[in-house]
Structures are given as C-alpha cells and as structure tokens.
Amino acid sequence: MSAPVAPAVGAVPTTALGARGLTLAYDDRVVVQGLDVDVPDGELTVIVGPNACGKSTLLKAFARTLKPSAGTVFLDGAPLGSYRPKAVARRVAMLPQTPIAPDGITVRDLVTRGRFPHQDLFHPSSGSDRAAVQLALAQTDTVGLADRGVDELSGGQRQRVWIAMVLAQETDIVLLDEPTTFLDIAHQYDVLELAAALHAAGRTVVAVLHDLNQAARYATHVIAMREGSIVAQGPPAAVLTADLVEEVFGLPCVVVPDPETGTPLVVPRRAR
C-alpha cells in the first residue's frame, strides 16, 4: 500500500491549492479533522473513498462553500478566506453534486453565468465572454440545447450544461464533485475524456469519483480517504492495490492490468 506523502507540518503549501490542519464539520458532526493536503499542480487528481468519508466535504472547502471549523485552506500561498469571492472564482471553479438552476432559465443564460467572475458593473459582457460560452457549449455537446429551458432537459443533459458553465468560467483549477452523476455509461466517459483534455491543456483538475476503475484510468494522482483522513496518495498504480481497496472499502478483490490502458483494473471477488 502506498503511504500518504506528508506535507510539511505547519508550512504553507508549495502548490496552488492545499490545506493545513483542516477540520470540517456540519453543525456538531466532524467529517474531516486535522487534515494536511497539497493538490498537485497541473495534475488530474481523483479523490476516492467510501460514502461519508469526507471527499465532497473537502472539495467544498477548496471551493470556499464550506468554512473550516479549524485550519486553513490556501490558494497561491495565501489563506483562501483572504480573497474576495470574485478573485477566488477567477482561479477555482466547482461543479457541486446537486446544482440548482433558477426557474425558467435557458441553457445559454445558465452557461453565461460562468462568466460572472470576469465581468464588472461597467463591462457586463464582451465578445470574449460570448466566445467562452460558445466554446463551453461545443465542448460539452450542448450547442443544440442552448435555447431550451434547463428545466426541460433530462438529468444527463442538465449535467452536461452545468459542466459547460464551469468550463465557461475559464479557471486554472477545476473541481468536479461526482461529475458523472445521472449520465449513461457513454456520457460518463465523455465527461472523463473532457476532464483529461482539461488536464492535458495544463489545468489542475480535482474530481470525486465512486468508480475505482474510472479513477484508475483517468487520474494521474489518486487520493484515497477513509473516515476523514487520507490513507494513501500517489499514482493510481501505487495506490489502487488489492490490499488498499479491501482496507478502505472492505471489498476483497484482485487488481489486474486494464487490457485497454494498462492501468489498474479492480475485479471484486465473489462471495463464497
């Protein structure tokens, strides 16, 4: 099993996004406690772990939608809370698990909202904004939906539209919380190929996924969590071993090379 790469205790992260001594809670229920983590720059990091282990909660802290109970999230070496919201939104974009669209809004109008961090009172819209929106629609295969109401769409179509809004934001860091939710298998892989393309273009991508084989195929860096702590992190081949999968998920399995990519392929053992 791969041991976690321990960041320097108390030191400011050397990567653009990271945390020190991070404790996250909902009311009195602590989900993450005393966590130190550095998100590798320019990598496609996938966070895996069982339900309620803190994966999505950590992503919310990175996006500043959940305030830490203790500790600090850092962006570019400064506490995340020291930035104005628009400044954060120009660097970090997040797709949450269950986004909610305003009633009656069209697809194009929703995607255009991704440009808000780049606008101000005197320059509400520009040609570059329109170009970014059109590119995001094209990347997510939603151009044909642009004039339809979001509430008319299927779950999979809505998910692609939300991803388009995130892409239109044009940030260096993209956070995706279970981005394949509601999608059929073909569109799941479309979204993951898009995440891989963002990474190839130089963006830092952090995604929460439940499918270990999808994580192994697309991630360049894997963080495995359990009960609010990081159990292991590193390249997929070093992290996604049979021993770790059984330790973290309680799932006896064998791990073999994926015949298509050579990445780890987790094969559950049958109950006897």
Image (spheres, grey):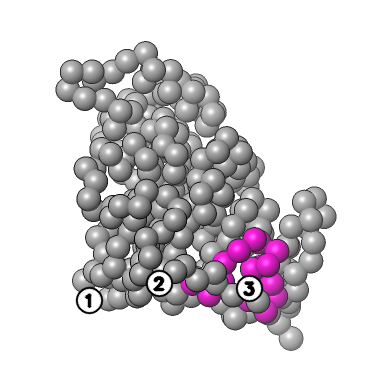
Q: How many labels does the image show?
A: 3
* Residue shown at the point (60%, 42%) measured from the top left: 196
User: As shown in the figure, which amino acid type bears the numbered disc 1?
Assistant: Asp
User: Which dot, 1 or 3, sits closer to the camera?
Assistant: 3
Considering only vertical position in the picture, is 104 above or below 239?
Answer: above
Q: What stretch is highlighted in magenta?
A: 230-245
What residue would you read off at disc 2?
9
Of residues 216 and 80, the one nearer the viewer is 80
> Horizontal and vertical percent for residue 106?
34, 26
Label 1 sits on residue: 28
Residue to which mark 3 is pinned: 2
In x, y percent, where is residue 50? 50, 71
The residue that appears at 32% across and 15% down in the rendered structure is 126
Give x and y (percent) for residue 99: 34, 46
Q: SS for tag 2? A: loop
The stretch drawn in magenta includes residue 240: yes
In which image quadrant can residue 222 be found?
Answer: bottom right
| Residue 144 covered by magenta stretch | no
Mark sitting earlier along the chain (1/3):
3
Residue drawn at x 38%, y 65% as measured from the top left: 11
Cα distance in 3D space between marks 1 and 3: 32 Å
Q: In which quarter of the image is residue 152?
A: top left
First in residue order: circle 2 vs circle 1:
2
Quarter of the view holding residue 45: bottom right
